[in-house]
Amino acid sequence: MRFEETALWLDNLVPAAMVIHEPIGGTGFKVASFNLGAETFAATVEFNHIDTGLEAQGKDVRSELISVAKCEAPIIVGALNAAASIFAEEPRQHAMPGALVAGIIERAGLAEQVSVRHGLFVAPFMWGKQVPQFDEPKQLTVLLHMLMLTQDEYDYATTYGVAELQKEMLAGSIDLNNWAR
């Protein structure tokens, strides 16, 4: 999927004006951000070129990373760019639901601005049970939601598993979009 197609697809999914952010320092990925008022929605725009190692019905399954946070665009854009770069550079780290990625905020240089540190990647839930997809003859592109975790939450997930962490977070009514929690 080309940049223009991806940008149009994302623009049609989010009811707000889209701003495209160029890669920081000339390396990384373009990221789109959408100001939703108290929150910012952001999505990579060219990550679907990275092989996830997944296939479905004879097609490569690729993704664009998304996230929502109560923060300014440069913070969420930097975090998504760092996560995308980690996936692109680490062949053993696959962009798929259930993936835990350590050190995203440190990599982005944002440790002074937020208290979350690490990422948990899940199927997006903001569209209900239907995950937006862009279907092409040889490739299926889906959205992959990056939830940011504090150090304690990450430690819990690595000790007890992602499913147990998700149960605890739901029971505790944790505001996952608050990156200063």
Image (cartoon, rainbow, N blue to C red):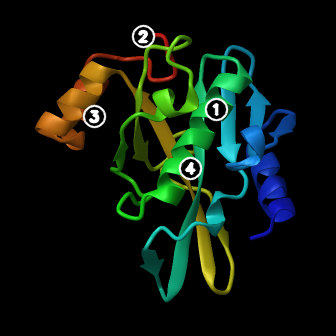
Disc nearer the start of the sequence (3/1): 1
Identify the residue at horizontal 56%, vertical 21% (top origin): 110
The front one of 114 and 126 is 114
Distance of label 2 from label 3 (alpha carbons): 16 Å
Which residue carries the number 4 mark?
85
Distance of label 3 from label 1 (alpha carbons): 25 Å
Tally the marks.
4
Quarter of the image that includes the N terminus: bottom right
For label 4, the SS is: helix
Which residue carries the number 1 mark?
78
Hey, what amino acid is under mark 4?
Answer: Ser
Q: Which is closer to the viewer, label 3 or label 1?
A: 1
| Residue 121 left/right relative to 130 | left
Identify the residue at horizontal 47%, vertical 35% (top origin): 104
Disc nearer the start of the sequence (1/2): 1
Disc nearer the start of the sequence (2/3): 3
Mark 3 closeness class: few <14, some 14–19, many ≥20 residues within 10 Å: few
Which residue carries the number 3 mark?
166
For label 3, the SS is: helix
